[in-house]
Image (cartoon, rainbow, N blue to C red):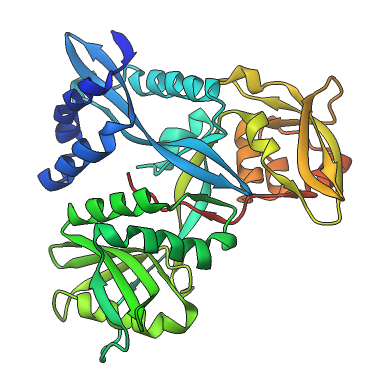
Amino acid sequence: MQLRKLEVNEHGLTRGLWEKVFSEDSKEFLDYYYFIKTRDNQIYVIEEDGQIRSMLQLNPYLIQIEDEQFACNYIIAVATEEDYRRRGYMGELLRKSMLDMYAAKEPFTFLMPAAEAIYTPYDFRFIYAQEQYESQGKSGALAVECTDASMRDSAAMAEFFRANFAEQYQVFAERDEMYYQTMIFEQQSENGGVKLLRKDGNLVGLFAYACEDNTVEIREPLYLPEYEEEFQKAVYALKLGSDAVVKIYADHQNRSGKKVPVIMARILHLETLLSAMKVKDGEELKCSFAVLDSIITKNSRVWELTGGQEDRDIQVRETEDSEGVITISALTSFLFGYKTVEEIRGETDVIIPERLGQELEKIQTLEHVFLNEIV
């Protein structure tokens, strides 16, 4: 058994394994993925009997955390050939890739799990629940122009997000011109595209869509509040027939659906993440706690956090005096605002005395997350 990271010119060697394990993916999608996404991603593999039997891919994204940007990786295509499963290959790939990402001082990594239980042993925890609902749309003539985006529209799309939505979120993938060009390619590979809504020549909304059988999926509709009705008319126009189902994911305006946990994250370089965070307005933070991390053991230190009042940035340093103990998984749930201090206090190996809990409450957690990346 050999574990190694492939050279870029070897990335195509993993397509056969992808086709075996993820047989539901179309040729068109894989053509797109292996032409576009594998140009700059990383692929870790385990070879056995002279062939690639297991893989894990890291797709790079520039992630905004508060007012800073960091290179982070989205984990995808964690796969093992059926006859080679239950040998611990996935765990080996996860540990190796996470240690490499830690060495690069990446604050966290994230993924969309096939099942939560697969990744919890490696200290991944949910950090983002996505609004999901079904819609029949609304009949009627559109009062806006609705067209498919082309590559030349990507700069306007990026500016539309920055001007109208970026300030609402603390954590999101930077949506620059290249991001939207890639989105267009991706959606086209799934029999879809990206629709643009314009009023008097100005962009007022956009959404990605894909069509399969009698189902339309719409991802991340972004539109100005006063154009929600026009968005629903555009949804109606996309229906493939009177019985078509339109599934809508991550509508930032509509709150009629249900919140579905979709993205799990794992803290990698803890000091980097903490240093990117803020103290709540008007508060002054000073506390220390020991962290338990059995995989990235360099995170297992006693950390002191200070900051607040005039400078809201959190200052992080190692110390010797600990007020409590927090596991890396519990810390992930708390720092991303997915669980409260009281909730993580009840987890195994977590010790949070009253004073430490009061200090932790002064941290501005990263609860406004917007991570809807698929690949």
Image coordinates of residue 201 in percent, x first then y, are: 34, 79
Residue drawn at x 45%, y 34% is 119
- Image quarter hosting the N terminus: top left
For residue 28, side relative to residue 94 (left or right): left
Residue drawn at x 51%, y 40% is 265
For residue 102, side relative to residue 35 (left or right): right
Location of residue 218 by image quarter: bottom left
How many numbered callouts? Answer: 0
**Residue 136 seen in render:** no
Is residue 142 depicted above or below 217 in this figure?
Answer: below
For residue 367, side relative to residue 46 (left or right): right
Location of residue 58 by image quarter: top left
**Residue 179 seen in render:** yes
Is residue 52 depicted above or below 279 in this figure?
Answer: above
Which of 222 and 156 lies nearest the eye of the viewer? 156
Residue found at the very far bottom of the displayed protein: 140
Image coordinates of residue 52 in percent, x first then y, are: 21, 18
Residue drawn at x 13%, y 78% is 241
- Image quarter hosting the C terminus: top left
Residue drawn at x 56%, y 29% is 268
